[in-house]
Each structure stands twice: as C-alpha cells, then as structure tokens.
Image (tube, rainbow, N blue to C red):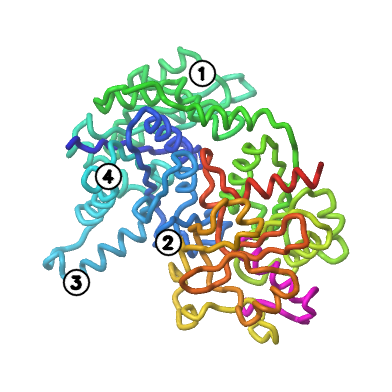
Amino acid sequence: MAEVKYVFVTGGVTSSLGKGTLSASLAKLLQSRGYSVTIQKLDPYINVDPGTLNPYEHGECYVTIDGAETDLDLGHYERFLNVPTSQANNVTTGSIYKSVIEKERKGEYLGKTVQVIPHITDEIKRRIKLLSPGNKYDIVLTEIGGTVGDIESLPYIESVRQLKWELGPQNCIVIHLTLVPYLSASGESKTKPTQHSVKTLLEEGIQPDILVLRTEKKLNAGLKRKVALFCNVEESAVIESLDVSTIYEVPIYMLEEKLDQIVLKKLGLPVLEEPDLGQWREFLRKLKNPKHTVKIGLVGKYVELADAYKSITEALIHGGAYNECKVNIEFIHSEKITETNVNQLLDALDGILVAPGFGSRGIDGKILAVKYARENSIPFLGICLGMQCAVIEFARNVLDLEGAHSTEIDHKTLYPVIDLMEEQKSIIEKGGTMRLGGFKCRITNDSKTFAAYGKSEVTERHRHRYEFNDEYIDLFRDNGMIPVGINPESNLVEIMEIRNHPWFVGVQFHPEYSSTVISPHPLFVHFIKACIDKKD
C-alpha cells in the first residue's frame, strides 16, 4: 500500500490571510485529479474545542456529523470537497495537553518527566497520522492555525519539522501563505514582510517548499524571482494569490497558477488527469450571472461579525446560485428590533431568517421578526433558536398563552413551550454536553419540507439543549402550526410549519452545516425559491 503524503499549510505576516480557503482549494484540485484527500486543522488555543467560545471570539462553531464542535474552517473543507469531516479533522492545543496529562495520570509514561518534546510533539504527530488509518487517503492536508512566530504554534511547527525529517522530502512538504502588501503612496508591492516571515520559519527549523503570496495587485516576474532568491524557494514554486470576488474562484485561480501540479511534483506523484471541475464552473457561472435578486434579512445577535453566521451565509449563496439568484443578505441585530421600528426594519425584505444563538439577549427582537414574517406572509426560515422563537411567538399571539417562553430564558413561565431536554437536566459541564451531531428526522409527506427534501427520512446535525415541549403538541397542531418532522427514536419535534402561509419553516437542527457547492441544502434552495416567488 502506498505511503500517505502530507502537506502542511502555515501562515505568515498576519492572520486571516485565508489558509482555510487555500487548503480547501488545493484539496479540491487534488480531489478533481483523482486523489483521495482530507484536510485537518491544528488550532493553537488551549480550549479543548470551540464549543465554549463566544462567536465574537472565534466565529461560528461548526458541528460535524459525529458530534464534534470544531473550527469554522472545517465548514470550508466540507463545502469545497463535498465530503463530511469528523472529530479527527480538528485538533486543539487544549485537546493535546488534555490527552497527554490523562496519560501521565494513568502512569503511561513510566515515571518520566513529561515535556513538550517529545511528549506533546509525539501526541501532535499521532493525531496528524490518525486521520488516515490504513492509508485511507492518498494525501492529508494540515492547516496550522495562527501565524508563524506565535508562541502558541511552536509545538505544531516543531512537530512538522520532525515529520519532514522522519518521512522524507517526497512524503511531507510545507506551503507557506504570506502577504505582499501594496503601498499606494509609492505604487509598490513590498516583499520584505514575506522575507521576514520565511526567516522566522527557518529559525524554527522549517524551509518552506512552496510560497503562496496573497496580494491585491498582480505581481511581476521580477518580484517573484526576488522572493524565490531571498527565500530559497524554486521560482516555479512562488505562487500568486490575487484577491478575487468570491472564495469559490480560488480553486480556479490556483489551477491557473499550477499549484496542484507543483504539489504533486514535489510529492513524487503523477499528474493523473485534467481536473474535472465542470460542476464547479457551472456553479460559478450561475453565481456571477443571476437572473433574480432577493433581499433576505438575517436576524441575529452576533451580526457585527459575519463569521458568526458563516455557514448560513454560504448556504444562502449555494441556494441562491442553484436558483440563479443573487442573495443580498441584510444583517439585522435582533436587539435593535422593537415594536415601534419592526415595520421599518423589515419592510423591504423578501425573506426572513432567524438565526441560532443562546441566552436572553436579543430574544424579544427575534420573536418580533417571527411575528412580522407570519403576519405579512413573508417566507421564513428559523434555525434552532429561530425555530424556538417561532414556537414562542405562535403560542403567545395565536394560542393566547400569555407569557409563553423557553425555560432557558424564563424558568418560571406558566407556559414552557420550549423546555430543557430531560437528559440535560443533570449536566453541569458546558463543553461538548449538548445534543450534538447527526440525528434522524422523519418528515410528513404533505409538507413543504418534504417537497424540499423529496424524501421522508433525513439525517441532520444538531447543537442544542432545549426542545419543543410535546405536552403542547396537539394544541399547536389543532391551530395550524404543524410538527412535520419528528425524530423516530426519541419522538422529539424537529420541524414546525405553518400551513396557511406561503413558506414558514422552523427547524431544530442546523441545515446550514450540510450545504456544499455541489449539493446545496434543499431547505435553503426552497426558501430562496419562495423568496423569489414572493417578490415576483
């Protein structure tokens, strides 16, 4: 069996250069050439996972089908590759140290002094190799979070240095993504930050094999030659990454720059065939040449940071492209919605999406947004807490259950239409203790949700502690809000619809996690179609 090849992606100069997008784009190209590829994220923070992080700190928490709370970059990996990730695809410093300390407590190190080298680095290398058991993949890409020179990332860089020495240059290469800033005052692109970044990497023991230069202006051959000379990299291995209008253009740009061919050459692998990117190009064609335009209000309480709703915004792009429709997303802070301004804020929208979240802040604005969508026949999609807000609004304003609420917000409410799940009541710890990962849902045939999916049973990803209180199920059903999706094992309500409405769907799960370029999620596709119909 052939050896697994490893590609590591590091970043220099500044954070947020797009290592995740670069990694996903390269993986897409290698996949389209016939290689089996997966991507892993090594995150340098000491949290065990992002599950306890505020979205303002780190963007959204992405949930895998096997129930891991992970970095949002795993969403990019899935959206590009159309292949599910797992718990093994995200490693944090916290999880590494937790594992090593647990082994030490069990006496597995036989009385030795436990140190960063070799114990922490050995555990990092074990996790990297764990991703391809039995050589399941031809190529494993690993993105190292943070910026070269950070204290936090040093153990990861050292582990990569060791792996390059252990596996050999044809089995392990490093791509360094860096920035070439453009100074408008002098009209020049400057390479010095890249030189210093590579120098820092060299000081940590790693010579990069390929340099990818992020830039807003095209780079001339002389500048690339200068970078190659000063950074000790082949001229052909200096790749330009020009700013593009959408992240989905990056694979095409990297193909033109021959990044995938250079990687295969350095790994000693044949260039098997021309990449099959027909579906990807068709997606881009529809994305860039829309026949329709709709404005959708995304109502949430973390809207100042777009990454807090990254999977939702990308799923809207996917669903829009499928419908040949440009989706203009208007981020609306739920705390700013009041009885007096709700009409003014929401009047120009073709659709309303109430986003997930936790806690009481902004909940009243979300409930007002639901009411506006219901009363004005505006297509509505509620996700997780968004569905729960729809239930609360219906209970108060249609069923006349005054003060109906979720016990998450008001534990003394007389009408707890949303309540803590039974198995959650004895749980004290916060991290990784919610209902997480993929669960089945059985869908009623005569529903809009069934029309979207085209099948009666699906598996969707969850991340919640509270649920619809089924003591009220008959009351809701008899008055027009129908539980059309039920978990077959637990009988938990997963989907609620209002029948006498053009398109009103609330889901307890997170459909946005499953939407990809090649397979846009059907609920987003049909939600946007309903928005187009409403506008027309």
Q: Which residue is mark 3?
A: 106
Q: Is residue 23 above or below residue 270?
A: below
The amino acid type of the residue labelled 1 equals: Leu
Q: Position of residue 478 (x, y in %)?
A: 72, 75
User: Which range is magenta?
Assistant: 383-408
Q: Which mark is residue 441?
A: none
| Disc on the earlier residue, 4 or 2 | 2
Tag 3 near tag 1, CB within 8 Å:
no
Amino acid type indicated by mark 3: Lys
Relative to 385, is 470 above or below?
below
Per the image, label 4 sits on a secondary structure element best described as helix
Is residue 191 within the magenta segment?
no
Furthest-top residue in this view: 222
Q: Residue at x 69, y 71 (%)?
A: 391
Indicate which disc residue 158 carries.
4
Q: Which residue is mark 2?
A: 67
- Measured as percent of width and height from the top left, residue 240 is found at 47, 23
Disc on the earlier residue, 3 or 1:
3
Dot 2 or dot 3: first in sequence order is: 2
- Mark 2 residue crowding within 10 angstroms, few (<14) / some (14–19) / many (20+): many
Image quadrant where one finds the N terminus: top left
Locate residue 391 relative to residue 444 in the image: left or right: right
**Numbered label attached to residue 219:** 1
Q: Is the C terminus in the top left, top right, bottom left or bottom right quadrant?
A: top right
Of 331 and 413, the residue lying toward us? 413
Please name which of the two marks, 3 or 1, marks the residue nearer to the observer: 3
Residue 531: percent from left, percent from top: 74, 47
Cα separation between marks 3 and 4: 26 Å
Name the foreground residue: 180 vs 241: 241
Q: Earlier in the sequence, mark 3 or mark 4?
A: 3
Q: Quick one: label 2 or label 1, which is nearer the N terminus?
A: 2
